[in-house]
Every structure is written in structure tokens, then in C-alpha cells.
Amino acid sequence: MIYEFRTYNLTPGAVPQVLELFGAGYEHRKKHSELAAFWFTEVGPLNQIIHVWPYESMQHRAEVRDAAIKDPKWDPGLARLGLVKDERSEIFRTAPNSPFMEPGTYGPLYEFRDYTIKSGTMPELLQIWGDNVHIRTAFSPLIAALYSDVGPLNRFIHIWPYESLRHREEVRKQAGASGNWPPKGERELIERQSSMILSAAPCSPLQ
């Protein structure tokens, strides 16, 4: 499977209207393929939405998008209404031992951690992650961990659900106090890190 992350930066104050329009249009879009997740930012770059689409392959993506574009009921009109400032698309694959979580209620808050890995070291990072992620998931569940395939390279993202910001703080403190997380060797492979806090859109399969 591949996962397309489509990130839109919206005009200030447009998030509620976009969620409503997208939700109505999604009733038609999901006939062609369904979302994996849809979030909007609470902390980090504001006025931003991220919608995630799973596909079997790039060919499958092309076929689905071609069918959706031809569907007159799908386009929610975000660009036509001037609600989108810019957008980007990136393709990710799942890291070892980190399948994308099935639809369900896990949040309501999600932390989106975005790492840039030193050039040429992604295989080593993925090996360390795959061998050790079970240590971290003993403290709280993982929604997904993925690495970039198309778009900016050397990106590694992992997404964690929490009941609240306090819950996030408690879990991270417990994991760090274990002495086993982050796993040995990981930090040396990271160039830079960023983090966002997200909420799920009403139409998101992950809540």
C-alpha cells in the first residue's frame, strides 16, 4: 500500500467551511476510494488540513483520481471559492511493524511528528524503528509511521493519538523514564524534527 498525504493551507478562518464542504463532497468521493484519515491543525501551522488516501499502487491512484475528477458530484469547490492558499501532495510507505491503524476512535488529539533523516541513513532508521517500536506502543497506540517515497525525501513521520495534551505529556514522560525510548542510535540519524497537534475532521475514519 501507498498513502497519499494531501496538505492544504487555507485562508484564515476557512477551516469550518472547508470541513463542511469537504464532508458533503466526500459522500460522493468515497464511492471511488475511501479516506484513511483527515485532520486539521490545532497547534503548529494554523489553517491547515491534511487528508490521507490509501492506494494499492501508483496505477491504482491514477485510476481512482481519474474517475473522481470525472464525477461532477465530487468537487467540493474549495479552490473555486478561494479557500485554498496552496497545496501539496506526498506519497508515503509504512515503516516496518507499523501498519496504518484501522478506522476507529483513538483521539481526540493526534500528534504528528515529522523527522528529516540524514541522507542515506533511512534504511538504518527503519531497521531501528522496526526492531523497537513495540517498546513505545506498550505505553500508547501508534496510528502510523511512514517514510517518504515521492515528494521531499528522507522524511519519517509518526502519528500518535492522545486523550488530551496532559495525556500526551504523561505518556511521553513514562516512555522516556523507561530508559528504552527513543531507541539507541535513532537520534544520531535525525537532522531535524517538528511536531503538530491535530484534531480529526467529522468525516475522518479516525476520530
Image: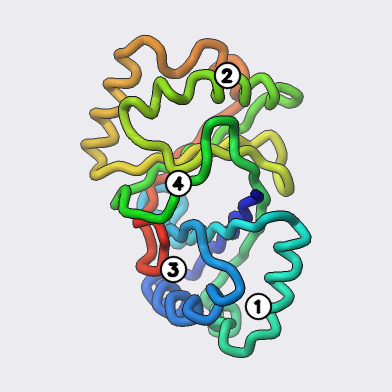
Question: Which residue lies under the disc numbered 2?
Answer: 128
Q: How many marks?
A: 4
Q: Residues within 10 Å of mark 2 (few under 14, many from 20)?
A: some
Q: Earlier in the sequence, mark 4 or mark 3?
A: 3
Residue under label 4, please give it: 101
Residue 193 location (% of width, % of height): 53, 32
Secondary structure under badge 3?
Answer: loop
Q: Nearer the viewer, mark 1 or mark 3?
A: 1
Q: CA distance from mark 4 to mark 1?
A: 25 Å
Q: Earlier in the sequence, mark 2 or mark 4?
A: 4
**Vertical side of 39 occupied by 131: above or below:** above
Looking at marks 4 and 1 on the same chain, the residue that comes earlier in the sequence is marked by 1
Kindly identify the amino acid type of the residue bearing the numbered disc 3.
Pro
Q: Are marks 4 and 1 in contact (CB under 8 Å)?
A: no
Which residue is more in the foreground, 128 or 192? Answer: 128
**As shown in the figure, which amino acid type bears the numbered disc 2?**
Ile
Where disc 1 sits, the SS reads helix
Q: Earlier in the sequence, mark 1 or mark 3?
A: 3
Kindly identify which residue carries mark 1. Answer: 68
- x 64%, y 46%: residue: 92
- Other residues around mark 4 within 10 Å, as few (<14) / some (14–19) / many (≥20): some
Between 119 and 3, the residue placed more toward the observer is 3
Give neighbour class at mark 3: few <14, some 14-19, many 20+ (Cα, 10 Å): few
List x then y, in percent, for residue 79: 59, 78
Q: Is residue 114 above or below residue 110?
A: above
Please name the residue that numbered disc 3 is placed on: 12
How far apart, in angstroms, are the residues tagged by discs 1 and 2? 39 Å
| Disc 4 to disc 3, C-alpha distance | 31 Å
Residue 198: x and y in percent read 39, 51
- Separation (CA) of disc 3 from disc 2: 40 Å
Q: Nearer the viewer, mark 4 or mark 1?
A: 4
Disc 2 vs disc 4: Cβ atoms closer than 8 Å?
A: no
